[in-house]
Image (tube, grey):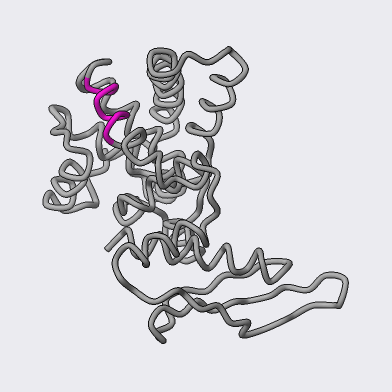
Amino acid sequence: MVRIMKTPLFESKLREVEEILSYHFTDTALLVQALTHSSYSKEMKQKGIQAEHYERLEFLGDAVLEVVTSEMLFHQFDWDEGKLTKKRAAIVCEESLSYIAAKLGLGDYLILSTGEEKTGGRKRSSILCDLVEALIGAVYLDGGMKEAKDLIGRMVFSHLKDNPAVSGKDYKTVLQEKIQAEGGEAPYYRVISEEGPPHKRIFTVELLISGKAVAEGTGSSKKQAQQAAAEEALRLLYSR
């Protein structure tokens, strides 16, 4: 006998997600599904429990996002097709959507398997991107196109200015501008480890703000590691 999963999130946590989205679900099950990763669904299946994951909603949300983004850009800018296509691609890409999810702290509400949790699934860009699309799909099914369009305006378009994937600024620049705007000291980066052979080095960089270690990043060059550390710092700062 297959049992249907009861929500593994407290009701208060679901309300918090609704507050972040500024949208109240009529069908809360859609919200739970949008937050459920396939790894959790597989884990529950082994226990004889049915848990719908977000991949179907992600498919729908991806299509809705592309249509709405296309319409918004069409009405906002008198650009040719090539420029409109390039801008749309930057807005709906994985880097852009994962940045938005991290900024809003949505990864904290993901429903993951034990294994996915341990391997850092909450911060994985591909999962965060899928989560945004799934939430858009869920709102579309729950409230229709108008609500989905309003959500995209709030969640995606209102954050374009400081979105590195769209603005063209790198994570180090965005982080420094954010800190300076708040009157803080410029971030400092230091290499804390180097591993691997000379032709395939892996650098780990620690990022400090006001002398306090905030984040770490790794990469095949010091520059890449610094960017990774700055990206992590932005996620932490925005999630707070």
In the figure, 182 relative to 109: above or below?
A: below
Please give the range of residues in magenta.
147-154
* Quadrant of the rendering where the C terminus is positioned: bottom left
The number of callouts visible is: 0
Q: Residue drawn 38% across and 82% down?
A: 210
- Residue 152 on the magenta span: yes
Q: Quadrant of residue 2?
A: top left
In the figure, 66 relative to 103: above or below?
A: above
Residue in front for this viewpoint, 165 or 46: 165
- Residue 157 on the magenta span: no
Instruction: Give the left or right position of residue 98, taking residue 146 as reference.
Output: right
Asked whether the viewer can see residue 1, the reply is no
State the residue lying farthest toward the right: 199
Residue 204, image x, y percentages = 63, 76
Q: Main secondary structure of the magenta part?
A: helix
Residue 42, image x, y percentages = 45, 45
Residue in front for this viewpoint, 236 or 223: 223
Residue in front for this viewpoint, 40 or 60: 60
Residue in front for this viewpoint, 129 or 211: 211
* Quadrant of the rendering where the N terminus is positioned: top left
Instruction: Give the left or right position of residue 222, taking residue 27 as reference.
Output: right
